Image (cartoon, helix red, strand yellow):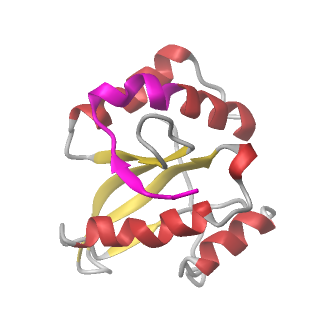
Amino acid sequence: MSAALTLAGPDQLEKILPLVASYHLEAGIDSTDASRMTGIAPLLDGIPQGCAYLIGPPRAPIGYIVITFGWSVEFGGLDAIIDELYVRPGVRGRGIGSEALIALPRALASGGLRAIHLEVDRSNEQALKLYQRAGFTPRNNSVSLSKRL
């Protein structure tokens, strides 16, 4: 099975929405059909703040990655955050997540991206191993904090 990445566009909305719903359910994220639509549709329409990639065949994707863009003085320019990464449970453990995380920087590097960040629950050892295999390292003395507006 291939972890090929395809930039998702408006015509893939019906393919990605069920994946987002599955991820939110599995992760315990309280969301509605309307909030998921509001969150994903602008990314597929091409807003400059982010994008979504389908993992696997575009006709029958096995996962997705959502990237949002920002600017970092520390890293010297454009950076990105992996906002969501999901691979269907039935195909996990086959290296698909690792392949996707290795392919992602290649897909984004030509746009001048300087760094990619993500956050993970410290107790999720499986995810930590996945991210470390893909070259992500913890930042010393750094903690991710959020405030909902």
Q: Residue 9: percent from the left, percent from the top? A: 28, 35
Residue 131 lies left or right of residue 65; in this view the side is right
Q: Is residue 3 visible?
A: yes
Q: Is residue 142 above or below residue 11?
A: below
Given residues 1 and 107, the one toward you in this image is: 1
The answer to if 5 sits in the magenta stretch is yes
Q: Is residue 79 above or below residue 49?
A: below
Looking at this view, name the residue that lies furthest to the front: 1
Q: Residue at x 73, y 45 (%)?
A: 89
- What is the span of residues highlighted in magenta in the rendered image? 1-17
Q: Residue at x 40, y 31 (%)?
A: 40
Image quarter of residue 112: bottom left
Looking at this view, name the residue that lies furthest to the bottom: 140
Q: Residue at x 57, y 75 (%)?
A: 142
Image quarter of residue 124: bottom right
The answer to if 9 sits in the magenta stretch is yes
Q: Is residue 122 visible?
A: no
Q: Residue 105: percent from the left, percent from the top? A: 36, 71
Q: Residue at x 64, y 37 (%)?
A: 23
